[in-house]
Structure formats: C-alpha cells, structure tokens
Image: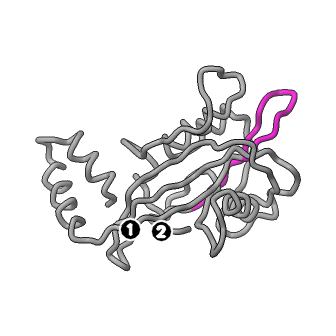
Amino acid sequence: MTVDRAVRGLWFAAGGPDAPAAAATMLRMARYPTRQAVSAGGLVFADRPDGRWVVLISRRNAAGQLQWTLPKGGLEQGEDLEAAAVREVAEETGLRSRIVDKLGVVDYWFVWKPDEVRYHKYVHYYLMAFVDGDTRSHDDEAEDVAWLPLEQAVGRLTHPNERRLVGLADPTRPDVTPGVTADAGAGGAGADPEPSPTP
C-alpha cells in the first residue's frame, strides 16, 4: 500500500473499518528511509483536420493490472529532464517528437518493498509535437500504443492526475495552460505504484 493510499484511507474512512488498517500501514512505513525519484515523459500530439490527437501507452502495474498512461521513465547518467523525456517517449511509443512546452509535474509516494524504501516521486511531463515514426516500433515497456482524439484519451487514462494534464493540452480551452504541478492527491498516480522507482 502506498503512503498516498494510506492517507486517503485515513481521510475517507475515518471512524470506519478501514481506518485502523490505514493507520497501521502509516506507522509501519514511517520506519522506512525516504528517497526522491525523478522521471520524465511526455504527451505526443498531432493536430489533424478533425482535431488534436494524442498518444497513450498501456502497461501493467505492480499488481499485473492493465493501465493506460503517458510514456515516461527514469533519467540516464548525464541526461537532463528534456533529453530523458524525448528518449523515453521514443522508446516506449516508437515515435520521434520535439518538445514544445512543459505540461506539468505529477508527484506521489510509493514504497519499493524489496529495499524497504519509501519514495517521493516527481514525474515531469512535456507537450511534444509528433515528428515521425511508427507505433509498432515501441519497446516492451508498453503492451500497446494508441493514437486517440484528445477527448477520448482523457477518458481512457487510468490516473486522474494524468487526465488533468492531458486536458491542459486541449487547444480549444483558453482557460487552461500547461506548466502546472499536479499533486497525486486522491486517486492520483501514486494510487497504483510502479514495479520500480525508476521505470
């Protein structure tokens, strides 16, 4: 169970049957050392006559459940955030793209049980214009890669924070702009931790 999930259990099940279990989990995790983890990824888009289309990937979480998400991954030695985002997106989608804006940051907590370490993870996302490539060339990090109309992509994404970020890429919405920070909060990306702190 992640820190985020345990905290939500305390908030929403206060006085209920789940509150003692959530409190016990928080106490157990308090003894774990805390470290930071950083990843970078992006939302690839292409503007077509029928609107903006974007790319999502599907992959399995630590519990083996299929999730639709944005491509992302850890930084390699000597990489900055933008270089890592471009590389990870290319590897996981098979597409080459260029960064046009910072989309936002998602942060969440999770526990990596093999090392008994509690991670506070920050994922930096960029808005990326499609250049070329073929989604059939993606690596084995993704089970599937799909181009979708932006509105459909928002509905398919598993995590609410990623849905909010993708909504910021809608060019028809003058009330929102990229570059925001999205806490994991209730139902955020931290609700289903990844199998590794730096995927």
Disc 2 residue crowd, few under 14, some 14–19, many 20+, Cα 10 Å? many
Which of labels 1 and 2 is toward the front? 1
Residue 197's mark?
A: 2
- How far from the left and from the top, in percent, is residue 44? 74, 47
The residue under label 1 is which amino acid type?
Arg
Amino acid type of the residue tagged 2 in the rendering: Pro
Query: Within the image, what quadrant is residue 71 found in?
Result: bottom right
Q: Percent x, y for residue 68?
A: 59, 50
The image position of residue 2, as x and y in percent, is 33, 59
| Residue for point 22% across, 65% down | 30
Where does the magenta region start and end? 44-59
Residue 59 is labelled as none
Circles 1, 2 touching at the beta carbon (< 8 Å): yes
What residue did someone put label 1 on?
35
Quarter of the image containing the N terminus?
bottom left
Task: For mark 1, give the secondary structure.
Answer: strand
Front residue of this view, candidates 124 and 78? 78
Quick one: quadrant of the C terminus? bottom right
Q: CA distance from mark 1 to mark 2?
A: 10 Å
Residues 69 and 98: in front is: 98
